[in-house]
Image (cartoon, rainbow, N blue to C red):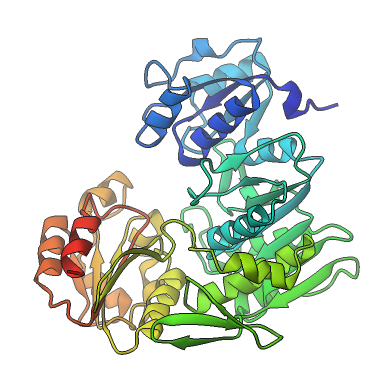
Amino acid sequence: MAATPASLNRLHLIATGGSIMHNLALALHRRGAQVTGSDDEIFEPAKSRLAAAGLLPAQEGWFPEKITADLDAVIVGMHARADNPELLKAQELGLRIYSFPEFIYEASKDKQRVVIGGSHGKTSITSLILHVLRYHGRKFDYAVGAQLEGFDLMVQLTEDSPIIIIEGDEYLSSPIDRRPKFHLYQHHIGLISGISWDHINVFPTEEDYREQFRIFAEMTPKAGVLIYDQHDEQVQLVTVPTNPDVKYIGYGPHEHTVKNGKTTLITKKDEEVPIQVFGDHNLRNISAAKEVCKQLGIKGKDFYEALATFKGAARRLELVREGEGSVVYKDFAHAPSKLKATATAFKKQYPKRRLVACLELHTFSSLNPAFLPQYAHTFDAPDVAIVYFNPQVLAHKRLPPLPPEAVQAAFQRPDLKVFTDSKALAAFLHEQNWQETNLLMMSSGTFDGLDLNQLAEEITR
């Protein structure tokens, strides 16, 4: 019989400095477990947060001597490699070794598991569900891939919460487990928000990538629920209602109006609900979250009451600063589908204003010459479209050099401006006329330290 996490009191985390892994360490520590960890590099905010809890390793690096027979289990993060010396020692000693998703499943075996999957929107949908549940005082655990406003950790594991809401990443589980994370949670309620090919280094073809979602859909158990975007063509291919024992629920964008840059929802009772987010993708996210909350016993009027106070997930179309004739937003968008959805939504929300939008190519897929053609015509909405990338990142990811003209050709936008120097990018942005003009900055990185707050302050004066 497998041990439950409640009996796993001595735990060691390999790659404890990772975004989700250091949050897991803090959550386990808060639960009363004895937690140790190692990593060869730990950056802020993980370093300060681990230090404040007394969990920061004394030294960066891997130390096999930390792996002893009296550990109850080892949890390994994706940052580690298969030949990690601590991992090899754990295998040699025959210790229990969990990936992050395996451990989360183990911790939630007795809970109702809700897993939010999809190439885009899953963080926003998950954060909205958590916001609604917390607003109404419901008990729940969670695991989400971003720091959310009002939640001090990205992971919460308790003994008494009857449900857990999990953001279901399709990326690999660990260096020794090549299964996608969201296959391991064994959902009762599953959701697929959209499918758009990503992670080319793991899924070399669009078919390979889509197959992972088909497997997820078919894992929905008897009396389970599968919620999906009924207008997404790729999703339609994997969510065919073939199991009579599963409840299939399709959704689309919520009915709404847009006036003076503000979006208002129209309910089935013709009531108006002003909201603080915008864009077709967010209107779909709201419908998705509403369906999940309905399955969890949240009535429509209670959902809308909570929704009115929802500001959105951090870094997901997040307002940086607003002025009289301009606004500055940042967004985590980097994949082609996310880029197109965000840029188009922004232009529709402020149709009378000029839009300057900048995308940083930062991920392996986005910088890969084989994947770049996926960006064709995804950046047509902005009046001024800019792409930035750092050639050193290409070298670090062992990718070939990327000529700016190749980027222009891939996006199929001749007037696309391409920068490879962050100072030159900043200078260009400072030179723009920002009267009745908005700025949208999109990246999973930081534009190599560009001070967006200072820039936004100057733009919105």
User: On the rendered structure, is 403 left or right of 375?
Assistant: left
> Which quadrant is home to the N terminus?
top right
Q: Toward the viewer: 384 or 159? A: 159
Task: Indicate left or right for 373 with 83 as reference.
Answer: left
The answer to whether residue 303 shows anywhere in this view is yes
Q: Is residue 439 visible?
A: no
Could you say which is closer to the camera, residue 77 or residue 248? 248
In the depicted structure, whether residue 88 falls above or below residue 410 = above
244 to 20, vertically: above or below: below
Question: What is the total number of numbered labels drawn onto the structure image?
Answer: 0
Residue found 79% across the figure and 40% down from its top: 109
Q: Position of residue 250 (x, y in %)?
A: 72, 76
Rendered residue at 72%/28% (across/down): 5
The residue at 31%/47% (across/down) is: 398
Image height of 152 relative to 91, above or below: below
Quadrant of the image occupied by residue 131:
bottom right
- Residue 146: where, in percent of width, then height? 49, 50
Image point (50%, 51%), residue name: 148
Q: Nearer the viewer, residue 62 or 83?
A: 62
Q: Is residue 255 above or below residue 56?
A: below
- The quarter holding residue 243 reads bottom right
Q: Where is residue 110, by image quadrant?
A: top right
Residue 310 versus residue 278: which sits nearer the camera?
Answer: 310
| Image position of 78 (left or right of 460) | right
Where does the image place residue 209, in percent across and percent down from the top left? Answer: 58, 62
Q: Quadrant of the C terminus?
A: bottom left
Q: Is residue 140 left or right of residue 202?
A: right
Tell me where residue 308 appears, x and y as whole percent. Answer: 56, 69
